[in-house]
């Protein structure tokens, strides 16, 4: 069993947990993920690692309540435990494995959208600890959905907050901030790392292409099983078939077929929606509406 040492609600639908998992904490690197299971009958949920403390033996995860399993996870409190907490899985970020001297010469921009702020943070923190100051754009729909601002401000070279509705920081999408930084503020970047919703990463890549900025994206949003067995995270990268959970989750954004990947994700969400409805309706979920599939 894996003890929940700390729980903090970041906003109404997003929460943070520090989980006691010494082996994972000893070996994990930024960019990797874990698989968590609430109980022996629970769904396997892949989650990117937000932070880790090797000395304390803890892993920090940030979760958004979307489906039935994450709703159940939200109800867990400090002192409760997970049945399974497996990792580290996936490949570390290339920034972590590349030659550090070559990275120091690069001007790096991170673009985080919504929950994507969580996996961006450990990479920016790692760079900061190695004397590299990266710029970071954090985007959210509204002020109440901005997360980890204080943590990010301590490790980023420059932090730019933007909200879709203009309620906090700059106003507009993250792509608008990229354009402003390059065209109006004279910024130049050698590399961009974009992590967030699929549609955000797609348009981030379209924007960085205009400025010839190589861009890495994380395909963790399409992961389901996390071991390469289910095939849900199969995607096309250039002329090759890859699996996000085994070969990634990070890939060259210029080569990713986003439309294909988003199509696969929509298929999975149909089943996820059915499970959430069953959880909410409990014993009254007996079908009859003809929409959710409960009557089949």
Image (cartoon, helix red, strand yellow):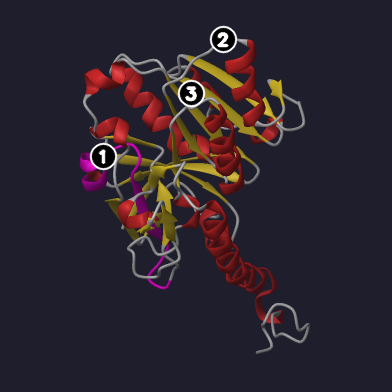
Q: In this view, does 63 lie to the left or right of 41?
A: right
Give the Cα distance between marks 3 and 1. 22 Å
Which of pointers 3 and 1 indicates the residue nearer the eye?
A: 3
The x, y position of residue 270, in whole percent, is 62, 69
Residues marked 3 and 2 touching at CB (< 8 Å): no
- Place residue 31 in its image quadrant: top left
Marked residue nearer the N-terminal end (3 or 2)? 3
Which residue corresponds to the image point at 21% horizontal and 47% vertical from the top-left?
23
The x, y position of residue 175, in whole percent, is 63, 30
Which one is nearer the viewer's eye here, 134 or 58?
134
Q: Which residues are drawn in magenta?
A: 23-41
Which residue corresponds to the image point at 49% horizontal and 57% vertical from the top-left?
222
Which one is nearer the viewer's eye here, 214 or 3?
214
Give the Cα distance between marks 1 and 2. 43 Å
Camera sees residue 80: no
Which residue corresponds to the image point at 65% horizontal and 75% vertical from the top-left?
282
Which of pointers 1 and 2 indicates the residue nearer the eye?
A: 2
Disc marking residue 57: 1
Under tag 3, what secondary structure? Answer: helix
Give the Cα distance between marks 3 and 2. 23 Å
Which residue corresponds to the image point at 54% horizontal and 18% vertical from the top-left?
159
Which of pointers 3 and 2 indicates the residue nearer the eye?
A: 2
Disc marking residue 152: 3
**Mark 2, residue position:** 186
The x, y position of residue 293, in whole percent, is 67, 82
């Amino acid at each position: 069993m894996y003890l929940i040492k700390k729980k903090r609600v970041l906003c109404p639908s997003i929460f943070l947990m520090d989980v006691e998992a010494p082996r994972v904490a000893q070996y994990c690197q930024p960019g990797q993920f874990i698989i968590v299971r609430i109980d022996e009958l629970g769904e396997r949920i892949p989650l990117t690692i937000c932070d880790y403390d090797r000395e304390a033996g803890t892993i920090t995860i940030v979760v958004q309540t979307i489906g039935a399993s994450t709703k159940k996870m939200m109800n867990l409190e400090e002192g409760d435990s997970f049945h399974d907490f497996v990792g580290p899985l996936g490949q570390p970020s290339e920034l972590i494995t590349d030659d550090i001297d070559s990275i120091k010469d690069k001007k790096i921009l991170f673009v985080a959208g919504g929950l994507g702020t969580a996996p961006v943070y450990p990479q920016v923190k790692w760079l900061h600890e190695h004397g590299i100051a990266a710029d970071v754009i954090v985007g959210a729909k509204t002020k109440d959905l901005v997360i980890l601002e204080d943590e990010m401000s301590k490790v980023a070279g420059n932090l730019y907050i933007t909200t879709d509705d203009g309620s906090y920081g700059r106003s507009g999408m993250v792509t608008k901030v990229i354009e402003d930084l390059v065209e109006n503020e004279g910024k130049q970047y050698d590399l961009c790392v974009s992590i967030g919703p699929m549609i955000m990463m797609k348009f981030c890549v379209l924007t960085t292409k205009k400025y010839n900025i190589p861009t890495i994206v994380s395909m963790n949003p399409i992961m389901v099983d996390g071991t390469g067995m289910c095939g849900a995270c199969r995607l096309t990268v250039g002329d090759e078939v890859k699996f996000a959970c085994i070969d990634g989750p990070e890939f060259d954004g210029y080569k990713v077929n986003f439309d294909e990947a988003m199509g696969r994700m929509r298929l999975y969400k149909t089943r996820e929606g059915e499970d959430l409805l069953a959880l909410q309706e409990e014993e009254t979920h007996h079908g009859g509406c003809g929409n959710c599939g409960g009557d089949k």
